[in-house]
Image (spheres, rainbow, N blue to C red):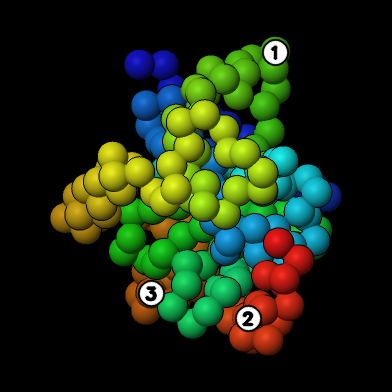
Amino acid sequence: MKCYTVKVECQCSQVEGELKNISPQSGNHIKCMCIDCQTFAHFLEKNEALLDRNGATELFQISPSQITFTKGVENIKALRLSSKGPFRWYTKCCQTPIANTIGLDKDFAGVFVEFMKFEEDHFSKQDALGEIKYYCMAKYSKGEPPAGATQGFPRSLFFKVALKLLLGKLTKNYLPNPFFNEENGLPVNECEVLEKEKRQLLRKRC
Ligand SMILES: [Zn+2]
Ligand SMILES: [Zn+2]
């Protein structure tokens, strides 16, 4: 299996890094139409660039240990839409979305394809990520969802993620985790929990 190193970079180039061992088999290439992903895009004021016509965000789910920041890690910040929600990382220099994570010992990072840079002369996005395999949470779709989309998260994807979380716990495959301190499990930088009123205002825009 051929694997690629995919460059990641924020819009203003203050934050850079790379994703290692990427191939279509190494992760789940999905589009998520859920209300929280849409809310996050509106929070960043990147809804035009980030959301497709169905209101879907394109993500590639891998292990946090496949992600390395080479520059500007001090510019990353997390947002939680509620006190129990996932940590949605983005850059505070230019509001570029990075990845959705769950916690230190959770072997999960849904990386925003928007954050990736493909130099087509070496390899294409298609080579590294393959086709989109799942169109999820179509109950929040704007208009007619794409063919094959599921109302919620498809069971096969749910089991893949659950198995990876379980195996990750045993093997500590989530380490090194660039988003959380290994000693105390806290986020490496600022983390904001969105106030309920603000969340409701953003949701109205979705
Ligand atoms: Zn930036
Ligand atoms: Zn979502």
Q: Tell me the SS state at disc 3.
A: loop
Q: Tell me the SS state at disc 1.
A: loop
Residue at the far left: name it.
170
Between the residue at mark 1 and the residue at mark 3, the CA separation in whole angstroms equals 40 Å
Is there a contact, CB below 8 Å, between mark 1 and mark 3? no
Q: Quadrant of the N terminus?
A: top left
Residue 19 placed where, x, y %? 52, 39
In this rendering, the answer to whether 12 lies above or below 22 is: below
Name the residue nearer the viewer: 140 or 116.
140
Residue found 64% across the figure and 68% down from its top: 77
Label disc, if present, on residue 121 of the rendered structure: 1
Between the residue at mark 2 and the residue at mark 1, the CA separation in whole angstroms equals 41 Å
Label disc, if present, on residue 194 of the rendered structure: 2
Q: Tell me the SS state at disc 2.
A: loop
The amino acid sitting under disc 1 is Asp
Circle nearer the N terminus (1, 3): 1
Residue found 37% across the figure and 26% down from its top: 25
> Is 165 displayed left or right of 145 in the figure?
left
